[in-house]
Amino acid sequence: MSEKSVRFYCDICKKTLTIKLSKEFQDKLKKNAHKWPYPLIFPHNKHWAVIFLDENMVERGVTTSKVEFKEEK
Ligand SMILES: [Zn+2]
């Protein structure tokens, strides 16, 4: 297993983006994933893309948001 590229369409940017996942990152994702597909949060340009990945780092769906909720404490 080596570095893998994940291509997805961001409907806020309105373009296809590519992120490169190192072997170390893939191992970290697999270690933390308690279910598949597992959502990977990708912040960029002041919004978020949530990319659902399967065990083979293949994109299984994408959603986007400009809103993050932080509870005041
Ligand atoms: Zn975007």
Image (cartoon, rainbow, N blue to C red):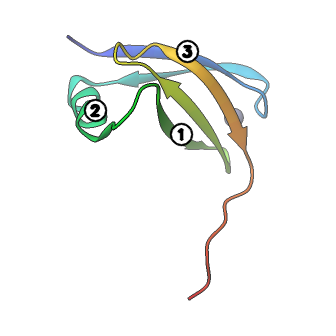
Residue contact between numbered discs 1 and 2, judged by CB atoms under 8 Å: no
Q: Is residue 51 above or below residue 72?
A: above
Q: Which mark is residue 8?
A: none
Number of numbered discs on residues: 3
Q: In terms of image quadrants, where is residue 69?
A: bottom right
Judged left or right of residue 59, residue 44 is right
How many neighbours does mark 2 have within 10 angstroms: few (below 14), some (14-19), or many (20 or more)?
Answer: few
Pick whichever, 42 or 37, lies toward us.
37
* N-term-proximal mark, 3 vs 1: 3
CA gap, disc 3 and disc 1: 12 Å
* N-term-proximal mark, 1 vs 2: 2
Q: Amino acid at mark 1?
A: Phe
Q: Which residue is mark 2?
A: 25
* N-term-proximal mark, 3 vs 2: 3
Q: Where residue 6 sits: x, y (%)?
A: 48, 17
Q: Amino acid at mark 3?
A: Arg
Q: Which residue is mark 3?
A: 7
**Kind of element beneath mark 1:** strand
Q: Which mark is residue 42?
A: 1
Q: Amino acid at mark 2?
A: Phe
Image point (47%, 36%), residue name: 40
Judged left or right of residue 45, residue 6 is left
Point out the residue furthest to the bottom here.
Answer: 73
Q: Where residue 63 sits: x, y (%)?
A: 68, 32
> The N terminus appears in which quarter of the rendering?
top left
How many neighbours does mark 3 have within 10 angstroms: few (below 14), some (14-19), or many (20 or more)?
Answer: some
Image point (28%, 32%), residue name: 25
